[in-house]
């Protein structure tokens, strides 16, 4: 199988245990050029921030800034000459529910997770040439079951799924596919041991997902073999 070299931009690659890092690694292994973004101010607050050495060209970018998407694409184009694959892996998260949700936290979820993603897709579409392109979003399980303790996050990810479907129709004639991956419960460093045990016990496979599980699906959707798949929410949850 011949896979031509592509140029991939992946957002939210802040540490080595995440889906973004695993995806970038797979792309690099198959010969693609890789450029990643991170948000240091947010990443440093995570418990796994010490595991943050990233081997690819990168840009620290705050997607709450409406000018960030253009700046990101300027940097990616300067490094790689263009972008063929856009993986929207970044995500703002702060737990809340109907009683505790605050306007500024809801706004942050919608601004970073939704507006930031839409504006990145806009830059991709504006600058894209040729008849081959791939966009992949990441979502969660809010479309399968309630997430009452993550109200703002669930709202933003639900919006992402709607955006993905809409963009798939808008960009299909240009050879650009748009899909969303739901990786289910994935061990990217945020789970406690008790959470890992609970997720594994609830899974028919008896384990939780890994970043590599999600990355393999993203890599497939971002290949020539994925050209007929677009507008889909693809669940990679091990039947959980």
Image (cartoon, helix red, strand yellow):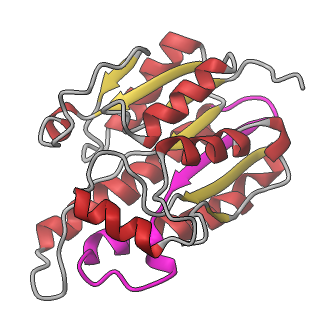
Percent x, y of residue 237: 56, 64
Magenta stretch encompasses residue 134: yes
The picture places residue 227, in percent across and down from the top left corner, at 83, 46
Of residues 225 and 122, which is closer to you in this image? 225
Q: Residue at x 19, y 63 (%)?
A: 94
Asked which quadrant contains residue 7, the reply is top right
The answer to which quarter of the image holds residue 181 is bottom right
| Of 236 and 208, the residue lying toward us | 208
* Viewer-proximal residue among 189 and 46: 189
Q: Residue at x 53, y 18 (%)?
A: 77
Q: In x, y percent, where is residue 49?
A: 19, 33
Front-lying residue, 112 or 52: 52
Q: Is residue 131 left or right of residue 64?
A: right
Q: Is residue 110 visible?
A: no
Magenta run includes residue 132: yes
Q: Is residue 96 above or below residue 70?
A: below
* Residue range corresponding to the magenta coloring: 128-156
For residue 163, side relative to residue 176 (left or right): left
């Amino acid at each position: 199988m011949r896979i031509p070299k592509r140029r991939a931009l992946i957002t939210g690659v802040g540490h080595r245990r995440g889906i973004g890092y695993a995806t970038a690694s797979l792309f690099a292994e198959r010969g693609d050029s890789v450029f990643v973004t991170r948000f240091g101010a947010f990443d440093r607050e995570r418990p796994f921030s010490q595991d943050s050495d990233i081997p690819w060209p990168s840009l620290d970018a705050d997607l709450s800034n409406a000018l960030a998407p253009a700046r990101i694409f300027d940097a990616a184009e300067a490094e790689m000459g263009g972008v063929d694959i856009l993986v929207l892996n970044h995500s703002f998260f702060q737990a809340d529910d109907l009683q505790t949700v605050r306007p500024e936290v809801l706004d942050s979820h919608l601004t970073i997770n939704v507006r930031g993603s839409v504006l990145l897709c806009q830059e991709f579409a504006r600058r894209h040439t040729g008849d081959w392109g791939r966009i992949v979003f990441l979502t969660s399980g809010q479309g399968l079951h309630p997430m009452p303790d993550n109200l703002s996050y669930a709202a933003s990810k639900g919006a992402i799924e709607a955006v993905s479907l809409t963009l798939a129709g808008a960009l299909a004639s240009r050879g650009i596919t748009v899909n969303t991956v739901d990786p289910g419960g994935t061990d990217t460093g945020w789970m406690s041991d008790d959470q890992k045990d609970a997720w594994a016990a609830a899974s028919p496979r008896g384990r939780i997902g890994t970043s590599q599980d999600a990355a393999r699906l993203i890599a497939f959707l971002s290949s020539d073999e994925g050209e007929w798949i677009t507008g889909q929410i693809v669940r990679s949850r091990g039947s959980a």
